[in-house]
Image (cartoon, rainbow, N blue to C red):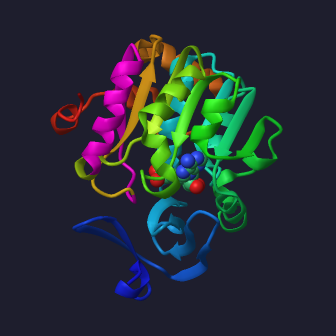
Amino acid sequence: MSEQDLMPGWSVELLHDDFRQCLKEATLLYDSETDHQRLRVFRNPTFGRILTLEGAVQVTEGDEFIYHEMMAHVPILAHGAAKRVLVIGGGDGGMAREALRHAGVERVVMVEIDAGVIEFSKRYLPGIGAGCFDDARLEVVISDGADYVKTTDETFDVIIVDSTDPVGPGVTLFTDTFYGHARSRLTEGGILVTQNGVPFLQGGELTGTMRAFKALFRDWTCYLATIPTYVGGPMAMGWGTDGAARDTPLETLVARFAEAGIATRYYTPAVHKAAFALPGYVAKLMP
Ligand code: SAM
């Protein structure tokens, strides 16, 4: 029985065994299998257009800004001189959009396994990419991100893993081997950030990644932001670097943010700093 049969007219997320998010489908815009996964796009009265993969919410017009701003601006502004950014996954275009808002960023490579996600995001959610796919600084590579970091000889100042959860094609992006290859693609002082689920419901996902980061990086931790449709409390974003970017003083972040001249709806330098303060139940998940 698919999630659709459970409550007709509602998208029922089957991500968690005993916890269900249900989103009203005012209008179903697209529903079919791509080469890799079942993709649905529907309109919800509160969150606008929503993209789901295998029934799990990937992005909504209503709250995507929180996730994309925190996954892009925290590492880029902490780094301070990021020119080359690698986005793994992120086929909806939101992450590339935010990275390309930094005038100092000269090159963004998006490595997305599923061309269908890009195609249908351009068609049904054009406001998410907001023209990023027409930006000459962006190169799109249709490939498994794990293969890309293993085979490319390019290096990056910031790597952002904007993946699905560790299901289907996303499983490879939560392995020690992948993290090791990703680290080897970082320039000196480069930063790796990863989508790491909602610790209250997906604690094991975070612990697994942090265990790998502890072995790989001088500075490893996670930071938090709450995205309403990633249900279950704050989402964790893994952070790994051998540099000192996390110690960047607030005044410096304020100056860099002002110089970048980027208007945001969630990100501020103070929110950036505060996001690394972990509540007890999350700190307990750290190895
Ligand atoms: N923000 C969302 C989340 O937190 O769940 C993720 C959004 S983004 C659309 C996720 C993308 O990762 C999907 O387009 C999916 O096709 C892509 N993806 C999954 N596994 C991948 C892999 N091994 N290599 C590259 N892209 C992958």
Decide: is 126 above or below 237: below
Q: Is residue 137 magenta?
A: no
Residue 81 % position (x, y): 63, 16
Residue found at x 48% / y 26%: 180
Q: Nearer the viewer, residue 146 or 5?
A: 146
In this orientation, which residue lies closer to the viewer: 90 or 181?
Answer: 181
Quadrant of res 212:
top left
Residue 170 in picture, x, y percent from top left: 49, 50
Work out whether 202 lies above or below 31: above
Note whether 99 is above or below 35 in the view shown.
above
Q: Quadrant of residue 249?
A: top left
Quadrant into which the C terminus falls = top left
Residue 209 part of the magenta segment: yes
Q: 132 or 272, which is in the foreground?
A: 132
Residue 7 in sight here: no
Seen at 67% across and 31% down, the residue is 151
Q: Is residue 87 left or right of residue 222?
A: right
Residue at left offset 77%, top offset 39%:
139
**Is 68 displayed left or right of 273 in the figure?**
right
User: In the rendered picture of this protein, how many numbered marks are placed on residues?
Assistant: 0
Tell me, yes or no, if residue 137 can be seen here.
yes
Image quarter hosting the N terminus: bottom left
Residue 123's spot in the image, x, y percent? Answer: 72, 66
- 198 and 278: which one is in front? 198
* Residue at x 50%, y 82% (from the top left corner): 26
* 233 with respect to 183 (left or right): left
Region of the chain picked out in magenta, as a range: 202-229
Q: Position of residue 72 (x, y in %)?
A: 55, 35
